[in-house]
Image: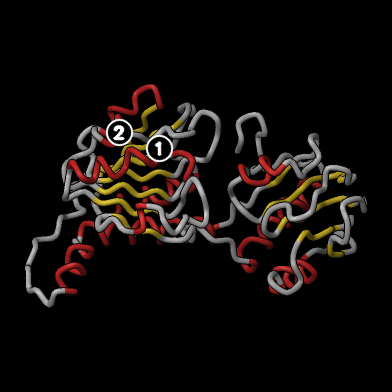
């Protein structure tokens, strides 16, 4: 079975080399135009070529967990299944980012940095993670991975999901979105891991943020479109001890004149929370592709109607 790779030979050389080494179902080639037929199409960094006229007989494989970008591009055939990345490397990266951001906040490192710039010795008692209520919007695979680690620190986790599943195995308290208030009320941290869909667009706004405790942190590592950006700074101004750590934005790269860059209680990172890595992503992705080629049902098929 033929694999075509949509990638830049210079920028994505490690991905191409790894794919050529690991794909054992047939020939491998780089995309040269938008019409050459293939069994599987691998998107290393989104659909850089327009593939709408391409005959993809089996499936498209994306090396990223999010599907909003490739769906919005309009560059893929409508009827072809899309297999998204869901390897442990991405889960580990998300865990490291979110837990690190949370501990950065409870340790008051942002405040210490401000005082350091003035050579000012100002002891401030850190918060304790133990016993703190944390709300996680989007408690799927990544959310549970993050939540389990925070629970090991003694945090009380409240996960918010679109719909609860029967026999959901989690020691966290699970809320459906119809009862998000119960999850957020008095929480010391709100972690947003939601995908970008029509239902989640600008979902996080003042009404949610105002349910959090004084001194809370908002961590956005999901999708930028899920936050109503103009609601964030007023919330921070109203609660000077609150902070926001943001990895994703409505417009990326974040424009140089955006007020988030200059706000003292906001930390901006350039969409690095959960990166794909060829040594982690491709072996797992190709393993599911082999199962798919054999007619097996696999996890990680994008539900186009839901946007993820």
Does 13 sit above or below residue 135? below
**Disc 1 and disc 2: Cα gap in Å?**
8 Å
As helix, strand or loop, the secondary structure at mark 2 comes to helix
Q: Residues within 10 Å of mark 1 (few under 14, many from 20)?
A: some
**Is residue 72 toward the left or the right of residue 219 in the image?**
right
Asked if the residue under mark 2 is in contact with the one under mark 1, i.e. CB atoms within 8 Å, the reply is: yes
Total marks placed? 2
Q: Which residue is mark 2?
A: 206
- Image quadrant occupied by the N terminus: bottom right
Q: Which residue is mark 1?
A: 228
Asked if 156 appears above or below 184 in the picture, the reply is: below
Crowding around mark 2 (Cα neighbors within 10 Å: few <14, some 14 to 19, many 20+) is: some
Q: Nearer the viewer, residue 42 or 248?
A: 248
Q: What residue is at 84 percent from the left and 58 percent from the top?
A: 3
Residue at the farthest top position: 178
Quarter of the rendering occupied by the C terminus: top right
Q: Residue at x 40, y 61 (%)?
A: 96
- For residue 109, which quarter of the picture? bottom left
Image point (24%, 34%), residue name: 210
Q: Residue furthest front?
A: 257
Q: Which labelled disc corresponds to residue 288?
A: none
Query: Which of the 4 quarters of the picture holds residue 52?
Result: top right
Which x, y percent locates residue 8? 74, 67
Q: Is residue 171 visible?
A: no
Numbered disc 1: secondary structure = loop
Residue 37 lies left or right of residue 126; in this view the side is right
Figure check: 62 above or below 281 = above
Quarter of the figure with residue 44: bottom right
Q: Earlier in the sequence, mark 1 or mark 2?
A: 2
Q: Position of residue 57 (x, y in %)?
A: 88, 44
Rendered position, 228 above or below 64: above
């Amino acid at each position: 079975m033929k694999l075509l790779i949509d990638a830049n030979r210079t920028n994505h050389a490690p991905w191409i080399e790894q794919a050529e080494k690991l794909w054992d179902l047939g020939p491998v080639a780089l995309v040269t135009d938008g019409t050459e037929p293939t069994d599987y199409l691998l998107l290393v960094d989104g659909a850089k070529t327009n593939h709408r006229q391409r005959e993809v007989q089996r499936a498209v494989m994306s090396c990223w967990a999010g599907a909003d970008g490739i769906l919005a591009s309009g560059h893929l055939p409508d009827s072809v299944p899309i297999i998204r990345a869901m390897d442990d490397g991405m889960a580990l990266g998300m865990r490291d980012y979110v837990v690190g951001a949370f501990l950065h906040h409870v340790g008051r490192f942002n405040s210490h940095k401000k005082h350091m710039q003035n050579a000012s010795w100002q002891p401030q008692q850190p918060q304790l993670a133990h016993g703190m209520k944390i709300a996680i919007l989007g408690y799927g695979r990544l959310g549970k991975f993050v939540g389990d680690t925070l629970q090991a620190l003694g945090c009380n986790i409240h996960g918010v999901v679109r719909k609860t599943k029967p026999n959901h195995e989690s020691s966290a308290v699970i809320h459906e979105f119809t009862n998000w208030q119960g999850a957020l009320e008095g929480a010391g941290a709100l972690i947003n891991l939601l995908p970008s869909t029509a239902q989640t667009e600008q979902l996080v706004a003042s009404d949610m943020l105002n349910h959090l405790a004084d001194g809370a942190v908002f961590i956005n590592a999901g999708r930028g479109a899920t936050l109503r950006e103009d609601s964030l700074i007023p919330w921070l101004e109203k609660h000077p001890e609150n902070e926001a750590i943001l990895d994703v934005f409505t417009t990326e790269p974040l424009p140089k004149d955006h007020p988030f860059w200059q706000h003292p209680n906001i930390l901006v990172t350039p969409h690095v929370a959960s990166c794909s890595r060829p040594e982690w992503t491709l072996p797992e992705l190709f393993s599911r592709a082999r199962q798919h080629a054999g007619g097996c049902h696999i996890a990680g098929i994008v539900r186009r109607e839901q946007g993820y």
